Amino acid sequence: MSSKTGGQWRRADFSRVPYDVFTDPLIYQWENERIFRGPVWNYLCHETELPHVGDFVSTWIGNTRVVVTHARDDSFHAFENSCAHRGAQIVTAVRGNAQRFSCPYHLWTYQLTGELTGVPMAAGVKGKGGMPPCFDKKDHGLTVLAVARFGGLIFGSFSDQAPPLREYLGPHAVAQIERLLVQRKPKVLGYLRQRIPGNWKLYNENVRDPYHGSLLHQFQVSFGLQQPTMKGGIKLDKDLKNTWNHSILSESDKDNQAIVAQAYEGTGKYNPNMRMADPALTQVPLDLGDGYKTTILSIFPSLVVAQVDNTYAIRHLRPKGPDLMELHLTYLGFESDTPEMTHNKLLAANFIGPAGYISLEDGEALRLVQEGVRHRQPGGSEVLEMGGVGPIEDTDYLSQEISIRGFWSFYHRIMGLPGAQVSV
Ligand code: FES
Ligand SMILES: [Fe+2]
């Protein structure tokens, strides 16, 4: 094994993933070059966060600082947050409204589009100094990104090689974004963010992993929100990079305690007699009448749009090195919600986030994986065989890791890593 190759990819169906990819600093550097600055669409923010001309949001794509703006012609723009003069970070506020941006250092001034329009003392002072005649402001704008939008989600790309956004998303993602973000006009209810001492790809695995849903998250099982007997499955886009996981809870799942007890046999983790003193949280009605209890849409490389019970949230992954990531959650309600519906959404928001009754364990699981992987002997691999090996395709069941293998197959391709030898 060599740290220069991202470890050995032993199997062509990606049922083995070398642990190196979670720890190797060189791999992390390549990811920033080949993925985050490569031909992908990176989530930036939601349109409702920039309702007025001049509104801006600071964010990240991989390890690059980016600013998103609402320009005068109502178009949206994104640029690297680093001055074209000598590199200073220009915007330090997380969000705000500005007519233009002046770099604090020498006051070079940029328009909302990233264009350079002001260079103090460009003509010199009292006929001395100043910029040379060949200096043209047009050549020194900020590094701008391609921007595309769908369903209010604003995406940016450093590359001009990314496919059209709808094609990149694929039909299942388009349908889900329409279901969650277009049918009703969203409004932001609030934000939470979380630091997780784990690699950003572990989170991508986690959201593509319904296998753990009814095992790690015992709150869900104990109070009837999720059961191993639930119907559901996954749907993938043609590149296998984006996944839609969904689950449907029926009354018979709640009744079928014998199967649940069997699924947990030997674990000592299941207590069918546990009850909540105040079960209001678990009784929030679902807004949508389509029966889906949980739908998790994961868009490569760093976006999740999730409906968990009656909680709607955009989750943005921000890598902070090989072994650290931040998760930014934007909680959504809808313009048409009654005050009671908003109250219910805020109540249900307790499921998700750093201390969420359901998601609290995910951050800890990632920490444990990172810790375990960091202190292993070199050369090991993950085992991803749940749901079967071989072809990577949609399933109509939840006990599977096939969508994780889909993530890795695309990752392996876009990173240009050495081939896996053994077909399964
Ligand atoms: S570094 Fe920005 S104006 Fe000089
Ligand atoms: Fe989870």
Image (cartoon, rainbow, N blue to C red):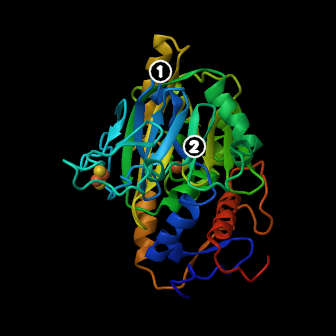
Vertical placement of residue 122 versus 205, above or below:
above
Q: Amino acid at mark 1?
A: Asn
The percent position of residue 331, horizontal first and vertical second, equals: 46, 32
Q: Label 2, label 1: how many angstroms apart (C-alpha)? A: 30 Å
Quadrant holding the N terminus: bottom right
Above-or-below relation of 91 to 204: above
- Say if disc 1 is inside 8 Å of ligand 2: no
Residue 411 appears in the rendering: yes
Crowd rating for badge 2 (residues with CA inside 10 Å; few <14, some 14–19, many 20+): many
> What residue lies at 19% left-to-right and 47% top-to-bottom?
126
Residue 143 locus on image (x, y percent): 48, 52
Q: Residue 255 location, x and y as percent? A: 66, 35
Furthest-front residue in view? Answer: 127
Crowd band around label 1 with a 10 angstrom C-alpha radius: few (<14), some (14–19), many (20+)? many
Q: Quadrant of residue 23?
A: bottom left
Viewer-proximal residue among 78 and 334: 78
Q: Which residue is mark 1?
A: 344
Residue 81's disc number: none
Q: Front-most of 392 and 368?
A: 392
Q: Earlier in the sequence, mark 2 or mark 1?
A: 2
Report if residue 229 is visible in the image: no
Number of marks in the rendered image: 2
Q: Amino acid at mark 2?
A: Phe
Q: Quadrant of the C terminus?
A: bottom right
Considering the numbered disc 2 on the image, is that residue within a helix, a strand or a loop? strand
In percent of width and height, residue 360 lies at 41, 47
Front tag of 2 and 1: 2
Q: Which residue is mark 2?
A: 155
Residue at the bottom extreme of this rendering: 1
